Image (spheres, helix red, strand yellow):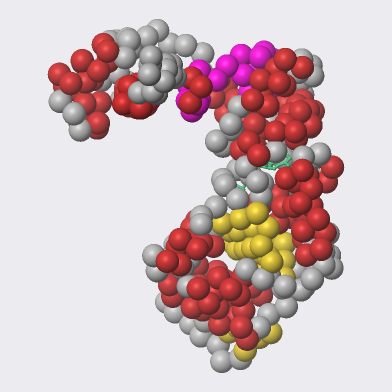
Amino acid sequence: MELPPDGVFFGPSEAMKIVRQRVARAAGLNVPILILGESGTGKEVLAHFIHDNSPWCKGPFIKVNCPAIPGTLLESELFGFQKGAFTGALAAKPGRIELAQGGTLFLDEIAELDANLQAKLLHVLQDGRFTRIGDHEEKRMDARVICATNRQLQNEIETGGFRADLFYRINVISIQLPPLRDRRDDIPLLAEYLREHFNRRFQREAPPLPNETLHLLQQRDWPGNVRELENCMARYVVLGSEEAFSFENSEPKVSDFAIQLTADGNIPLKSIAQQVTRRMERDVILKVLQANHWNRRKAAQVLKISYRALLYKVRQAGLPSKRPRQQADPDAELASAESAAPGV
Ligand SMILES: Nc1ncnc2c1ncn2[C@@H]1O[C@H](COP(=O)(O)OP(=O)(O)OP(=O)(O)O)[C@@H](O)[C@H]1O
Ligand SMILES: [Mg+2]
């Protein structure tokens, strides 16, 4: 993973200054760190950053993407196994806990661990020891543990999805990464870094963004956080035009809706809610029509509404009743440019 320089990663915003101070204090300590933050806020980048600035930086950085590995396999991936431990265990294999010795073990999306593995992980963290599956010998765990999640673990604990005792073990120091909308001061620097990054990667020469565009970017709420900004800058570099910044289909903001004060000063919530619902319906219907090659009967089935209701809604939303002529799809262009480009 190519890390941005730390001046870019943290940026000038107040919100990230707090993060930076916390990271500086925690990186060198041999205690688990829990990184919290919405999707796309840079949790994985931060985990790498902490590793690189820790006494374990010479050792390996081993990532475990908890939801990507099915439950039964995850146990053997984490703990490793001895030859013959189960059918198919033809040779002994170290697990990721063992591979991380002397380095950092990064448990990503920790909230997705099932109850069985939560119990086993708690055991390892408490004792500092683990055993390969099918082995009798205990090994000492010698890795700094960093966990990350975009879920509210407190809620998961309340609903029984996550063990409170494991939470206290992994949450010795927690670092909350702010969403991009809470660090708008960082957007110009991030956009400039990403422009240069993608210019290098795609061998383009997209010019710096004018101030008005940067200002526009600073006003957005960025539900997909830095990842969304990153995609947007990649599109800008690939397309070579500011078309990448037309956010017609982006999440509606309150200010997008006509809020009329009535004569008595009331704001009619019902009519605003209707507008929001219509807009959301329009977006969903459009996506389903596109996914089903404009087959309206199929789309109606998928949406679980009658064919007639769909026709009515299509008309009401001002959507075309037939598939429009093929238009250039910036995402497809980006995907093909990315597959042609060398990896980062
Ligand atoms: N400060 C930053 N500067 C440059 N790029 C960044 C920064 N923060 C995040 N990114 C980029 O944004 C993308 C998302 O970051 P990352 O994968 O670390 O987020 P995440 O919080 O782990 O998201 P998710 O919860 O969806 O896994 C990555 O491609 C990363 O390179
Ligand atoms: Mg992540």
Q: Is residue 242 magenta?
A: yes
What range of the chain is rendered magenta? 234-253
Screen quadrant of the C terminus: top right
Identify the residue at image location x=45%, y=61%.
155
Note whether 40 is above or below 90 in the view shown: above
Could you tell me residue 171's position as x and y percent? Answer: 62, 68
Q: Residue most toward the front? A: 264
Residue 306 shown left or right of residue 292 in the figure: left
Percent position of residue 61, x then y: 72, 62
* Residue 117 percent coordinates (x, y): 48, 73
Relative height, residue 125 to residue 35 (above, below): below
Please check the rendered image and state whether residue 146 is part of the magenta-colored stretch, yes or no: no
Q: Position of residue 164 (x, y in %)?
A: 50, 73
Q: Name which residue lies at 69% across and 66% down.
A: 173
The residue drawn where x is 57% and y is 28% is 335
Residue 229 visible, this angle: yes
- Residue 302, by quadrant, is top left
Is residue 227 something that shows in the picture?
no
164 or 335: nearer the eye?
A: 164
Quadrant hosting residue 60: bottom right
In the rendered structure, the answer to whether residue 199 lies left or right of residue 219 reads: right
Q: How many marks?
A: 0
Give above or below for 100 relative to 332: below
Residue 217 location, quadrant: top right
